[in-house]
């Protein structure tokens, strides 16, 4: 199967004449909250329905917009169609938690963190300075970037393997989160998965300085996109605090109600029909029911 490369045609849109000023449509309000609320780890995909190239491009553009230390290029992502891989490679990619769902998803995004990305820092920071993102008022200058930021922070960071991998992975995760939300907004299902990196390293021509992060399964959900309800989280106050670790950040009923209205907060799994849905899908795909 070939990726659809035909350009998408659109009629002249407002974006062509956009002057950079915010408009009402920049804040549709409910959508961001609902997209965050709608996202699920999807584990059943329509194996026969490919993902359109333009949707992949939108996901990549969303990932590319994520916030990033030193405006660096930390994440590298390779899109691979399942059907372009031979059965042996497919099998070799599997881990104990990445099994039949890997066979169902038509598209894989392999993500890597570039641990040399901190080295490009000074050039990118100076560019940001020249564009007015930093200013002398906050202590920034080209000299400050070279003498302080590069010499005392970035160069040591790139030299210490654990630190370089740590920062690269954090940055990569931010881009991954954007891609997952963009996919949800486009009606796609996703699931981050561990994978056997050596099984695909040569084929993808992965440079040695790139560290495998996750593979993202992408496709149209074969289950209801609500996937039986939102997955539970511990109480907010277990993970979020005010001032110090001993002062839990207590949620309020008014905000909770508003977030339910915006669909960020949705009923927690399992919906009453979830068990029947899982059995039905298992039968449809010839997978074990128990
Ligand atoms: C970074 C990351 C790695 C994950 N790795 C796996 C995995 O290897 N196998 C798997 O079945 N699910 C994996 N998941 C999916 C999580 O189990 C899932 O996100 C979690 O159950 C919460 O469900 P939700 O994403 O629908 O809220 C991963 C999720 C993330 C964010």
Image (cartoon, helix red, strand yellow):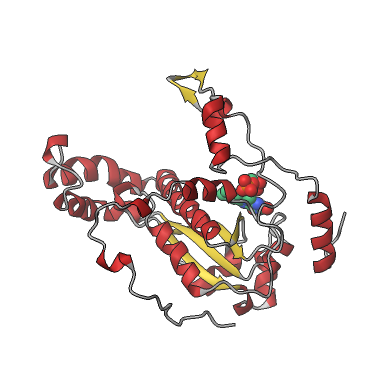
Q: Residue at 40% x, 48% y: name it.
A: 164
User: Which corner quadrant of the image does residue 48 belong to?
Assistant: bottom right
Q: Going by the picture, which residue comes out furthest to the front?
A: 24
Q: Quadrant of the C terminus?
A: bottom right
Can residue 212 be seen? no
Residue 272 lies, in percent from the top left, at 80, 45
Residue 36 lies, in percent from the top left, at 53, 47
Using residue 124 as the reference point, say whether residue 140 is left or right of it.
left
> In this orientation, which residue lies closer to the viewer: 192 or 95?
192
Across the whole image, how many numbered discs are drawn on residues? 0
Can residue 187 be seen? yes
Q: Residue at 42% x, 58% y: name it.
A: 62
Q: Above or below — where is 166 with respect to 59? A: above
> In this orientation, which residue lies closer to the viewer: 266 or 238?
266
Q: Above or below — where is 259 with respect to 117? A: above
Q: Residue at 47% x, 48% y: name it.
A: 32
Using residue 248 as the reference point, say whether residue 11 is left or right of it.
left
Q: Above or below — where is 282 with respect to 34? A: below
Residue 64 lies, in percent from the top left, at 38, 59
Residue 31 lies, in percent from the top left, at 48, 50
């Amino acid at each position: 199967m070939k990726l659809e490369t035909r350009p998408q045609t659109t009629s002249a849109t407002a974006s062509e004449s956009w002057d950079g000023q915010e408009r009402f449509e920049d804040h549709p309000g409910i959508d961001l909250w609902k997209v965050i609320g709608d996202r699920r780890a999807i584990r059943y995909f329509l194996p026969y329905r490919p993902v359109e190239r333009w949707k992949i491009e939108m996901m990549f553009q969303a990932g590319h917009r994520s916030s990033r230390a030193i405006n660096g290029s930390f994440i590298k992502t390779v899109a691979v169609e399942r059907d372009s891989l031979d059965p042996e490679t497919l099998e070799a990619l599997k881990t104990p938690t990445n099994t039949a769902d890997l066979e169902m998803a038509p598209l894989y995004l392999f993500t890597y963190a570039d641990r040399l990305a901190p080295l490009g820092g000074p050039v990118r920071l100076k560019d940001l300075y020249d564009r007015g993102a930093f200013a002398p008022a906050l202590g920034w200058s080209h000299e400050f970037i070279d003498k302080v930021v590069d010499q005392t922070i970035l160069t040591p960071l790139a030299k210490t393997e654990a630190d370089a991998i740590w920062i690269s992975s954090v940055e990569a995760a931010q881009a991954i989160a954007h891609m997952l939300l963009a996919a949800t907004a486009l009606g796609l299902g996703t699931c981050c998965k561990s994978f056997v990196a050596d099984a695909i390293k040569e084929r993808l021509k992965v440079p040695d300085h790139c560290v495998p992060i996750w593979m993202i399964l992408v496709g149209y959900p074969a289950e209801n996109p609500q996937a039986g309800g939102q997955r539970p989280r511990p109480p907010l106050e277990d993970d979020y605090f005010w001032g110090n670790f001993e002062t839990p950040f207590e949620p309020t009923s008014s905000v909770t109600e508003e977030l339910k209205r915006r669909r960020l907060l949705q009923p927690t799994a399992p919906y009453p029909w979830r068990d029947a849905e899982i059995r039905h899908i298992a039968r449809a795909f010839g997978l074990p029911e128990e």
